[in-house]
Structures are given as structure tokens and as C-alpha cells.
Image (cartoon, coloured by chain):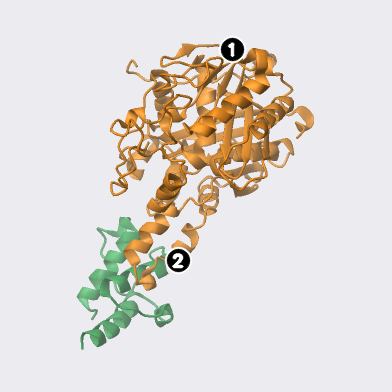
Chain colours: A green, B orange
Amino acid sequence: MVDPYIMSVLKGALVEIFPEYSTREIRPDESLRDLGANSIDRAEIIILTMERLQLKLPLLEFAQAKNINDLVNIFHHYYEALKK
Amino acid sequence: MKNLGKVDVIVTGMGAINALGQGITRFNSALLAGQCGISDCIRYPELSFLSAAAELKEFDFHQALLPYSHLPSPLLSAIHKVGRRAPLSIQASLIVALEAWVDAHLHERTKDNRRIGLVIAGQNTTQAYHYDLQASLQNNLHYLSPSYALQFMDTHHVGVLSEVFDIQGEGFTVGGASASGNVALIHGYRLILQDIVDICLVVGALADLSPLEIQGFYNIGALSGLSPFHKEPKKICRPFDRDHSGFVWGQGSGCIILESRDSLKEQIPSYGIMAGAAMNLDGTHTSTPNQDGERRAMAEALKNASLLPKDIRYINAHGSSSPIGDKTEVAAISNLFEEHLGKIWINSTKSLIGHCLWSAGILEAIATLLQMKQEFVHPNLNLDNPIDIASRFVGQQRETVTIDAAMSNSFGFGGINSSIIFTQPSTDFQDSGMVEPKGVKRARTSE
């Protein structure tokens, strides 16, 4: 179960880089790589998401993420911590 | 510089965007009509001294690509992907390179991509990009886009264009301040003469200045600020006129495709021959021009083209509307051309498109070739009281002229002088059918 708010922010960042995905449903089990993002695109999407969530995390935090589900969970963890 | 082996370097494609609009056809019509692209500066209203600029009008990257929708979609998607979030200067380079590429039929021709070269004219092409990013990020550098690491460098133009057009020969940027365009053309010319490439794209980068550069040019006295005409932007840029008071900043980008005529495998129309060129230094770091240096560049260019002063019918001057610049250039031209001065038409395209800085040399070479092809010389706007009566400046109406050989000058801060000679495609080759003169599509509306 992914955090829907974080998912929507991440999707917004994805669409910023790949406008062709604006009307397409993105599944949590898909990876950014599957969606055609190269390493710079992936870094860009993650940084855009961080900016919109006002989080400052090292990119290394996301190195182990295998798919969108993993990315959303990592963001969710730090976003919740920030709110406390 | 000797013209090695007498290889003919011809111009087979051109692309342009500037304050007069997009495309070579538009540019040609505007030159014929003597249209002025200068108006109030929209980008930086906070710079109160800035009375005028020749900015691109309502530029939209997506819109600018619409005329090319018929091209193969891999090419178009590649351009969209890399250009969509790129700085303005990159977008402009893509548009003009695409126009020139199609103009030269390179999208249809068989070619060896390792024999195509790429030279980008310009330095400091990301000033506004950098300035805007600093403003928006402020203390949040953490959120800087990773693509900044690629996009901040002038060589991003090289990477982007070589990717989109699959250019695999030599590629690099060249800096020559306001002479960058000519310096780049000269390097493209040399790559062909030295048989390193058969085809070379020469692209002038759009000078997207930040308020720092504009304030800087104003503070050094080079930019026209509070002139008597400061309430009338269209009257501020006055090359060779008694009331000239400095240059007007112009946004523009241009692309010229040079090819070795001998390597052409099919009949491709050409705009003309780049017959010779020269550049030199004055040995100064300042903005002060030097008559001897300018004269020497013109004289050496003629020698390189195996021509004499009497062979030139038209000079596209640097003519920036700088009092000392205009005066120095006139003196250098008079000194070199002597008794032939009265037979040579002189104008400056800067009164129509402003000073496009890094791409000035490219856009002015394009204007030179268009005038040669269409047999006219465009007006010098605002030339009410010429600073020299012996020079044959074009007035405020265009003239019909047959031009066999023309000269285009560019002089940059730091004592950089350059001059290029263009000639008509030779009549010998016209007979063989190998190279035909290029027709320019006329605008449908009357001008």
C-alpha cells in the first residue's frame, strides 16, 4: 500500500521529465528504468520530488530502491519523520 | 593563411532566428523591407537605462518545431526530448540547425557521419540560465537539477546537436567575443580545407544575457543607454550615424552549413562560396578597436581569397553603432580600399537585428549571402547624418546591386579582428550542373 500523496508528487515529477506519461496509470511495481528513465532522469525525478516535499536527503538513500514502490516508501519514511 | 589546395568551400544550408522572426525566408523578407526588430526590452524592465533590445518575439520551442512535423519522428522526438527543458540558447541552436540541415537536404542524403564537423560560436552562453537558477534556488542548492552539470557548459550545444544529427567528426566551441561567429566560420572552413571533414555545421549561439552583463556593457560605455532617442527604441541603433551612442543587444541564433564542393556526390544548390578569411589580434585586453588591426584582417582575407580590393562590391560591416567602433571601421575600410571606396556599398545588419554578439557573425554572413543571392543591399536604418561622406553607405531604402564578391567583418573586445569573403558560385561549375545557385522562397505577402 503506497502513500497516495507521495505517489502523486512522484508521478508529477515523472511527468515533468516524461510528459507522455501524464495520462497513463503508473503501477508501484514498475521501475523508473522500465519507464525509460536513464540515470540522470532518475536523479532528476528524485530531486524534483524531494524539492516538492521539502526534504533534503542524499541521493544515496535511494540507491537500493528497485521500483516506484520502494521509492515512495523511502520518501514516506522521511516525510513522516519531518512532520513529527 | 594559405587557402590549401584551392578546395571550394560552399554554403549549402542556412537557418536563422532573431528579432525579425524565425526562418531564412522571413529574414530575407525583413531585410528586403528594411524592417526593424528593435523595441522596448521586455525581459528586464527593471534595468531603467535599457531603452531598447532586439529580443526574440514570443518564442516557443514547441511552436517553432511545428513547421517540421513532416520529418521522421525519431529525429523530432530526439529534438523534443533534449530541447524541451534546455536553456533558451540550446533551443534556438536546435531550431536553426534543423532548418539548415533540411535546407541542405542532409536529412535525405547519404553521408558519412564521421566526416561531418560541428563548430559552435560563442562563450558564456548560459549567463541568464545561471542567474535565474541562482535566484530561484537561493539557499537550496540541494535541489539543483542534475542536468545543470551538463547544461551549464557551452559544450552542451556540441553534445546536443551531435546527438540529434548524429555528427561524429570533430566538434567544439570557439570564442571570439563579438567576432565569435566569424571565428567559428573560419574554423569550419579550415576543417574542410584540411580534409578533416567534408561537411561542417557552424552554429552561432544565442547570447542570453543576464542583468549583470547588460549592466556591465552599459557601465563600460558600450551599450546604448540614455541616448537622445531613448523614448524611441527603433531609432536608437544608428550604425555610422552622427548620433550613434552604442550597441543594442540582440537575441539571435544562426546556422551555416559549409561543404567541400569536391566531396559532393549529388547536385546540391549553394548560396555561395566562402572564398577566403583572416583573423588577427591587436594585443589588447580592452574594448578599444584598432584601425590597423581591422585593416590587416580585411587585407589578409582578400589575399586569402586571391582577390583585390577592387573586386569587392559590398561590405557587411561590423557597424555596431559604437561611436569609436564605427569611426575606426570606416577609417580602416577607407585606408584599404582607397580609390575604390565609392564603388562599394556598405551597410550594417545590426540596425535591423541588434548586436547578436556570439551569433552576430553567423547572422550577418547569412544576411550577406541572402543579399548576394537576391541582388540587393538592405537599408541602414537611422542613417540620417553619415559620419563619412566618402563611404558609400546604403541609405534608408534598399538598393538593387549585383554582388560578385562581398566582405563581412566582425570585431570583438580583446582586440579580435576578423573578415570573411564570400563569392558567387562560380560560373564554371554552373555549366557542369554540379552546383546550382540557391533560390530563396519569397514570402507570400508583399513587402
Q: In front of the other: label 2 or label 1?
A: 1
- Residue at 76%, 27% in the rendered image: B6
| Label 1: how many Cα within 10 Å (few below 14, some 14–19, many 20+) | some
- In the picture, the quarter occupied by the N terminus of chain B is top right
Question: Nearest the camera: B408 or B167?
Answer: B408
Q: Are marks 2 and 1 on the same chain?
A: no
Q: Position of residue B147 (x, y in %)?
A: 44, 62
- Residue B374, how many percent across, how many down? 50, 16
- Chain holding disc 2: A
Q: Residues within 10 Å of mark 2 (few under 14, many from 20)?
A: few
Q: Which residue appears at 40% of the width and 55% of the height?
A: B129
Q: Which mark is residue A40?
A: 2
- The picture places residue B426, in percent across and down from the top left corner, at 66, 17
Q: Looking at the image, is A61 positioned above or below residue B54? A: below
* Residue shown at the point (41%, 16%) measured from the top left: B396
Q: Picture quarter containing residue B16?
A: top left
Q: Mark on residue B342? A: 1
Counting from the top left corner in percent of width and height, residue A62 is at: 40, 79
Q: Is residue B339 visible?
A: yes
Q: Is residue B257 left or right of residue B397?
A: right
